[in-house]
Image (cartoon, rainbow, N blue to C red):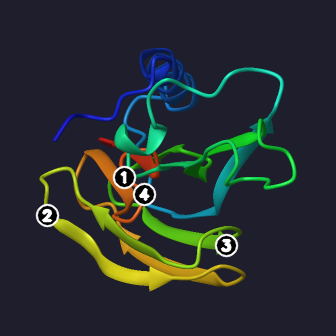
Amino acid sequence: MKDFKFPYLAVLLTISVLLIVACDSRKGTSLKPTDVTFYISEIEIKGATDGIAPPDIDPTTLSKGYRYKPPGKYDPNNPKKWQVSSYMFSPAFMSVFQGDTITLQVFVLNGDKHVNWVEAPDGSVAVPEHISNRGREYKTIFKAEQAGYYYLRCDEHEPTMRAVILSMPR
């Protein structure tokens, strides 16, 4: 499976490390584990138009996270209008320190079914899968035992619906 990378990840990591050094520059000091809460939305971004030609390739063939309603099906009264959409978590990048206890407060705006789970840096399951539905909030708590990338994933809409939690070593 391909790694999910953000082009700005290196910049964020550099800034995080500089802040850590600046905040913890006294000799013999260490950061203690803490509780961290993230408020996350599960959303579907949509866009419709009749001003440009539809795509040559059906976007749903590119990713389970894309949706497409072609001309004629989206709006029967306007045979030129079409729509695309993509599912995602927002925010899609978060950071903690190894040993922190993470609480994810996830509110589902769109989608009748999401199969969410959290993958640990070593590929193991940090949080087992659970089904979430539109209009509800779900609370998930786990400890960032490992340094590395934790992935909040939705099996129904991968790879676009994935969030990264960077667990930095203490």
Which is more foreground, mark 2 or mark 3? 3
Which residue, given by chain and number where applicable, does mark 1 sit on?
158
Which mark identifies residue 107? 3
Which is more foreground, mark 4 or mark 2? 4
Q: CA distance from mark 4 to mark 2?
A: 20 Å
Residue ID at (69%, 47%): 45
Decide if residue 131 is in sight here.
Answer: yes
Which residue, given by chain and number where applicable, does mark 4 sit on?
157
Q: Residues within 10 Å of mark 1 (few under 14, many from 20)?
A: some
Which amino acid type is marked by label 4? His
On the image, the x and y values in percent for residue 60 come to: 43, 45
Residue 113 vs residue 137: left or right?
left
Which amino acid type is marked by label 1? Glu
Farthest right residue?
77
Q: CA distance from mark 2 to mark 1?
A: 18 Å
Q: CA distance from mark 1 to mark 4?
A: 4 Å
Residue 32 vs residue 54: left or right?
left
